[in-house]
Amino acid sequence: MFTEEQKAKFKTWVVTIPDWSVWRMIQHVIGESFGWVAILVLHSATIPNLLAYKEGLIEQPMDFDVVVFIWSALVLMFIKGLVNREWLNTITIGIGFIVQAVLLGILVFR
């Protein structure tokens, strides 16, 4: 179907794809997007439990060690965002901390 010369050209072309600047930009955007989604998922892990506890739907809040692990991961990602000047990640984590602090304040002072 294909000649050996055509197969060789195709293999050469496929090998050069990762060197394209557009391809590197797409990889960077996809990687950053997954990092941002990870931040949203980490923040979302504690908020439903806090709201359910506030409304009286559950008897006990989330275990303390789970909250500490989640918040320590977010603090490390916040520091990474500051060092690398990733402002979207830094602002998202900061807003998430504010929302969670307000929810905890409502629970403590109700």
Image (cartoon, helix red, strand yellow):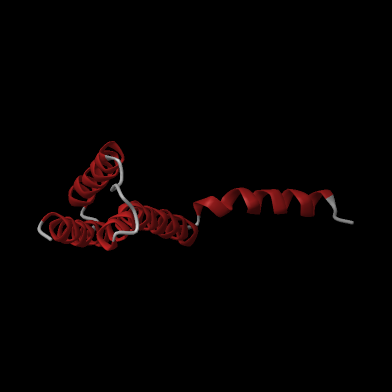
Q: Quadrant of residue 54?
A: bottom left
Q: Position of residue 43 (x, y in %)?
A: 30, 55
Left or right of 19: which side holds 4? right
Q: Nearer the viewer, residue 48 or 19?
A: 48
At 71% from the left edge and 53% from the top edge, which residue is drawn? 9
Measured along the vertical axis of the image, is residue 4 above or below residue 1? Answer: above
At 29% from the left edge and 59% from the top edge, which residue is drawn? 56
Q: Quadrant of residue 67?
A: top left
Residue placed furthest toward the left:
109
Measured along the vertical axis of the image, is residue 26 above or below residue 76? Answer: below
Residue placed furthest toward the top:
65
Q: Quadrant of residue 57?
A: bottom left
Q: Nearer the viewer, residue 18 or 5?
A: 18
- Number of labels in the image equals 0
Quarter of the image with the N terminus is bottom right
Quarter of the image with the C terminus is bottom left
Q: Position of residue 101 (x, y in %)?
A: 16, 56
Q: Position of residue 52 (x, y in %)?
A: 32, 59
Left or right of 34: which side holds 1? right
